[in-house]
Every structure is written in C-alpha cells, then in structure tokens.
Amino acid sequence: MDYPIIDKPVPAGGWNLADYAAARRDFDWQQACRLLDGRPGGINIGCVATDRHVRAGRGAVAALRWLGKDGTVRELSYGELAAASDRFAAALQAAGIAPGERVAVLAGRIPELYVAALGTLKAGAVFCPLFSAFGPEPVYTRLSRSEARVLVTTATLYARKVQANRARLPALTQVVLAAGEAPDTLGWQAFLDAAREPLRPVSTGAEDAALLHYTSGTTGAPKGALHVHGAVLAHAWSGHAVLDLRPGDVYWCTADPGWVTGMSYGLVAPLVLGATLVVDEAEFDAGRWYDILERERVNVWYTAPTAIRMLMKYGAEPLAGRGFPALRLLASVGEPLNPEAVVWAERHLGRPFHDTWWQTETGAIMVANYGAQAVRLGSMGRPLPGVEVAIVRRRRDGGLDFLADGEEGEIAIRAGWPSMFRGYLDEAERYAACFAEGWYLAGDLAVRDADGYFWFVGRNDDVIKTAGHLIGPFEVENVLMEHAAVAEAGVIGKPDPYAGEVIKAFVALKPGHVADDALRKALIGLARARLGPAVAPRELDFLPELPRTRSGKILRRLLKARELGLPEGDLSTLETDSDSARS
Ligand code: ATP
Ligand code: MG
C-alpha cells in the first residue's frame, strides 16, 4: 500500500485461528480506520472516496473505467471524479437542496449515476438509487415514500416510468436528464451550469444520513433501509480485509448500484481504497463478461451466485483459449454459494469464489471466507474482526437464548457496527422488532462450527418443517445442483396432512438436457441417496427458468404461492423479460 487507510493490516499469508481470535478480540473500529476527509470531526463518504486521493497526489489515477454497451470506453480519474461530484453537489445547493433531503437516480450504469451519487453525499443529501428496470409503479412508490426532491434519469426512462406520475410527486422539484430532453426537466449540463458558486462544504458527521436502500423484496414488500456516513469505516475495512482491495487494483463488481452491493462495493469501498473501478453498462453475457475479466485484467471480482450459475450453464466453450492471470480474488454475495460453483471457478478461472454474507440492513460484509483465510467449501466463512455474530433463538418473552456450536438458530449481530442501518423508512416498529437485548436479528438461519465458521441454512421464512425435521432449502438445492443436467434449483415446503410439509423442488436445466420422467426420477433418486427419504423432494417440476428478483435471488415465496394458488404478493422486484430491453 502506498499510503495507509487501515491501521491494522491483515497478516501476510492470512490469519491462523489464534491470530484471528486475537484480531477479533482487539479490534476497535475507531482505531481501525484512519479516514481523513480533511474536515475536523466530520466524515463524508463522497469526500473520502474522491478528495482524499487528490490530496494524496493520486488525482491522475483512473477511478472509473466505464464500458458502454456500444463499445465506448470512458475513463474518469480521481481528480475528474472529485471535481465532477463537487460540481453536482454545488448544483444541488444552487437548487436549494438541503442536507438530509433525498436525491434519487433512476438510470442504468452510466457515469452520471456515479457522479450524482458522490455529489449527493458531498452535499449532505441522502442518495436513493432506484434500479432502472423497475416499472412505473415501484418507481412511484419509492420516489413518493422517500420524498425525493431531485431525480436524475434519462429521457427514455422518464417518459416510460415517471412522467405519468409526476403530478402525484409534490416533493419532486427537479428532474435532471443525463440523456435526451423532455418538458419540465433540465439537461445534465444545464443543471450543472446553474451552479454559479463553488460547493460550500457541508459538514456531515458519522451519524448523518447518507444512503437510502431498498431491500430485494425476496420475502415480501421491499423495505427502505437508511444508512449513515460512518458506514464508510465498514466499507473500507471489509473492502480491505475481505476483497483485498489495494490502490491501483482493477476491480469489477457486477451488482447494479440500485442494490446495496452495487453501492457499498460497486462504488464506495473500491474508491475509498483507491482502486480502478470497472463499470459495465451492459447486461449479463457470458462472452462479454469473460472478455472484460481478461482484457481489463481484472484483479478482484465481486459477483453473485446467480451470475456464476449462468456462467456455469454456458459451460466451458466460451472459456476456450482464454486466461485470467490477473485475477487475484473472486467473491460472491446475495444467495448461498453452492460448493459446485467454488470448485468450478477454481478449475476454470484459476481461483475459488470467496463467499460473503451480509444484507441491505448490515450495509457491509459481516461474515466471509475472506481473502486472508482459506476458503471452507460450503461455509459462508467467519465474522470480520469488529463484528460479533452469534447464533440465537428468540424466546417467547422476547429475550434471546445463545446457542452452542453445531446448533441451528438465527444469525444475530451485536448492534453498533458502523454500517448498521439506522432505520426502516416509515417503519419504526418493524425496525425495533429487529433488535433484542442489544443484538440485531438477521432473519437468516445458520449453524456455527467449532472453528467459528458459519454455515447458511436458509431464511426464517423459507425453512421447511417436514416429519419433525427442519430443513433449509439450500441443503436440498445443493444436492440437485450436483447433477450435470441442473442449472438451478429452488425448493419449497408444501402443506401435507401427515408430514406437516413435504418438499417440492423446481429445477431449470442446462441447455441440451431433456426434462422427462427419467430425469425427474434420477434427480429425486440422487436426493434420496444423499439426504435420506425424509429430506428428499417428494415432487419435482421442471421450469424453463426460476423466478428471481432483479438482484438475482430465487423467489421461493413466489414458487410457493403459485404452487398453492395463493396471492402472489409484492412483485415489484420480480425480474421479467422486459429487463433486457430497459433503456
Ligand atoms: P427482503 O429483505 O426484501 O426479503 P432480501 O433479504 O433478499 O429481501 P437483501 O438485503 O438484498 O434483500 O439480501 C440479503 C439476504 O440475502 C440475506 O438475508 C440472505 O438471506 C441472502 N444472502 C446474502 N448473502 C448470502 C450468502 N452469502 N449466503 C446465503 N444467503 C445470502
Ligand atoms: Mg432481507
């Protein structure tokens, strides 16, 4: 590292178990990150991510390397990004946007999105990213609930998704178009030009609101999670310890900034740590993705199980003749990482995937097979130093029982880590219900082994109770995924008069495989042999694809609702075919 941001380095060669225990015991958030944003007492994500590098003489280093759909490449240095975000912040001030007010962006992954995000933070306003594939109704609900004052979007998205509802958004005083023109809006340049004065620095503190992120909506209606500027400590520390990001690294995060991963690790962490961020405007395409990894010489890559499963589905052919010698670390988040995927990556990309577990609510990685430790196949890893994680059971009286190693229970995190969400928008009771005895309850079930590694079981809502067993869908899906014909699998519980619930599996096949009765029998047989008859699926249906959220998570609640003929619930985040033609 040419200049330090983290006082406590990860030991070369990784932590052994004793070092790790000591690192966890001695960890102090305040000491761990020496973040200098130049304003006494204050901290501001936008400044830490850009201005700090300029002051350190790194202004000419590439901060963002944007790969347009049409092959255009645009590069912004740290100096340029600092200046552009200052300008956007000054324009917000000129437009009368006060600290704490919300600025939303509804756009694909275009450079303006990144400038607007950093500028909003620098102005002390709260940044609220909206995934560009949302339909008009979800866009309206989110803009309305967050009372956004400014929206940055494009003429096409505005016409399709905002214009008709504009009159129902009284708080929205300014719509800025990064591309195209429309009545009652301002062009990007005109908006910036309206700022006659330079940015008046805003002093934000660690507890000031910075980001408003909506959850994926996997288990129900999405929640708006509010995060603060101090979260950047956790982004910096986890980016360093887990993703092993170093100044000058080429780094690619495939998540869209409309989701928390695309913000925490697709913008904040890599910039704070001085990496060069690759941003791909296009959607998933196996050949293009391998091209990017190879041609851009990506050192660190952060993606999701759904993307890995898609790459695996296309097989070895698009990999022929390629090599990825620059790749140093691969990581994954969002869903359980199937052991198959880790082994596949080691074989085809030269490195294993490191699993990381966290949520919109946690703001940053909490548990991981991190860079400095060996990957334990099938486990999501261990808590980061500074993060205390326990396995608990809620008692009826509201208290917690702390469970022993090997016992299955809910993941709980001791409250107070810097990137902890500070509220659900307009849902104070729901927020309060997430905490007990000073611990945050994550709603996911897991087991911790004797070495302190955590093993994901399932979400509270997805766990299946059959014949006296509690079964996490992940366990069953993993076994089905081992079969060469299976691209992805989703498992649900179906009410049954005798067993309580029986397991039903939905399976999508890789190209070239036929969905027939023989294969159905073979898959159920495999599961019975591996898991025992009580835990194996009783029924199995083939689907061309499994329904998923736009952030790539299998929507088991929808599989279940459809199977049982129940109402489908909030589908605002369901991925649909129109997503591929979204801008
Ligand atoms: P909602 O809260 O609206 O139902 P969501 O929980 O899917 O949606 P996110 O915050 O985007 O919204 O996702 C966090 C969840 O994703 C975790 O609670 C967990 O269930 C799952 N998850 C994330 N990482 C992992 C992982 N490494 N292994 C297993 N599950 C993971
Ligand atoms: Mg959740």
Image (cartoon, rainbow, N blue to C red):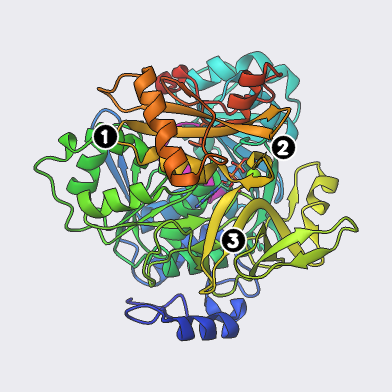
The N terminus: image quadrant = bottom left
Q: Secondary structure at mark 1?
A: helix
Please give the residue where the numbered disc 3 appears in the rendered image.
447
Range of residues picked out in magenta? 107-119
Q: Residue most toward the top? A: 164
State the residue at coordinates (32%, 77%): 2
Q: Which mark is residue 146?
A: 2
Q: Secondary structure at mark 2?
A: helix
Query: Which secondary structure is most common in the magenta stretch?
Result: helix
CA gap, disc 1 and disc 3? 34 Å
Answer yes or no: is residue 62 visible: yes
Q: Nearer the viewer, residue 20 or 150?
A: 20
Q: Residue most toward the left? A: 321
Residue 454 sits in quarter:
bottom right
Q: Nearer the viewer, mark 1 or mark 3?
A: 3
Q: Which mark is residue 286?
A: 1
Q: Residue 75, percent across and down?
A: 29, 47
